[in-house]
Amino acid sequence: MNWRITVASLALVSACSLAYLHTPAEACLHPAAEFKYPIKAGSQRGLVMFHGGKQHLVVAPGYKVDGVPAAKIKNDAIEGLTSLAMIIPVPNLPESYAEADGKLFDELDEFTEAAEVENTNRARRGAKGLADSPSEDDQDGATFYESVKAGAYTIQPIKASGEKGGIELNAWLSNNGFGAIGNDLLNYYMENKFYWLAVKLNAERGLPVSGNLKPLHLTVETEKPFFPLKIRAGEGEFDAELWVICTEKIDLDKTKAFGLQTVEQRDNMFYQKNRTTKPESLPQPAKALWDKFEMLKSPAEINCYRFYGAGLNKGGSLAKLEKDLTFEFKK
């Protein structure tokens, strides 16, 4: 059972930004204060698996570290880079938290690889998400739920309501190594009654120089599949790959407005393998997640979309989004 503490006054991969600890966090993935080398955003990967009002959200943030002397790198680990902190907004309090299989994205990569169109004459191819939270969570202030461990991740779920809640949330985040959230993003997510997951990743021997982190898996109730993209408005440009697996057909024109494209939209001389598939044909790590929808009748066929995002947030474009990334279905 979750316990909660409402704080009266206290003096965050989607998926999140990479920055110094002392930089205000529009979205955040921060090293410990004593780590002095520059960290930049690396390629980001994510999986959205949606069925019957539930979503598996898997985030694998990446990073690049500049200027680290060779003497500081041992066994592919960076000495002194022992922790990172990030914030993930979600429409409901997650039902479960876990580390995902490290092979998940590599196997999805192969399963959905691009293939060249053989016939060149072929026609060109062109939470309870925002529902009201329980009344006890609508009080003016910040509510801190029981922290959760998931492998090397420690997650602190938080709900903030009203002006007082925003102040308390930002104070706690700043005091705990996450940095404050900018007012526009803070107001957007609070108005839509999102929860905040303050996530810390710890590695005593140092995090990998490759910048590849083991994915974090969350299970969340939501009316439509979502991915926390707007939260990263405070960082520079970054590239991303995102897989969406669901029973419905996605409206790709609306997804394109967020800067995400399928391989066919990028180059109509190619197509994605296994766009339509069977649940049992998914790569084993992905199938294991789908099988967690055990209380729901599994369809005979599902859709597996692979989206590419190149240079996302160019010119700070994510800050201009009226809403966060929600995948709309064809009617």
Image (cartoon, helix red, strand yellow):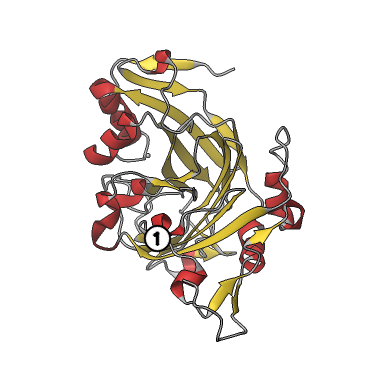
Q: Quadrant of residue 96?
A: top right
Can residue 172 be seen here? The reply is yes
Instruction: Give the left or right position of residue 193, taking residue 50 as reference.
Output: left
Indicate whether 209 appears above or below 172. Answer: below
Residue at position x 47%, y 47% from top? Answer: 83
How many residues crowd around disc 1 within 10 Å: few (fewer than 14), some, or many (20 or more)?
some
The answer to which of 298 and 6 lies nearer the viewer is 298
Q: How many marks?
A: 1
Residue at position x 41%, y 31% from top? Answer: 130
Residue at position x 48%, y 33% from top? Answer: 127
The answer to which of 17 and 261 lies nearer the viewer is 261
Question: Which residue appears farthest toward the right when viewing the image?
Answer: 280
Spot occupied by residue 25 in the image (x, y as percentages of width and height):
30, 45
Indicate whether 88 appears above or below 64. Answer: above
Spot occupied by residue 215 in the image (x, y as percentages of width and height):
57, 50
Residue bearing mark 1: 256
Can residue 180 be seen here? The reply is no
Residue type marked 1: Lys
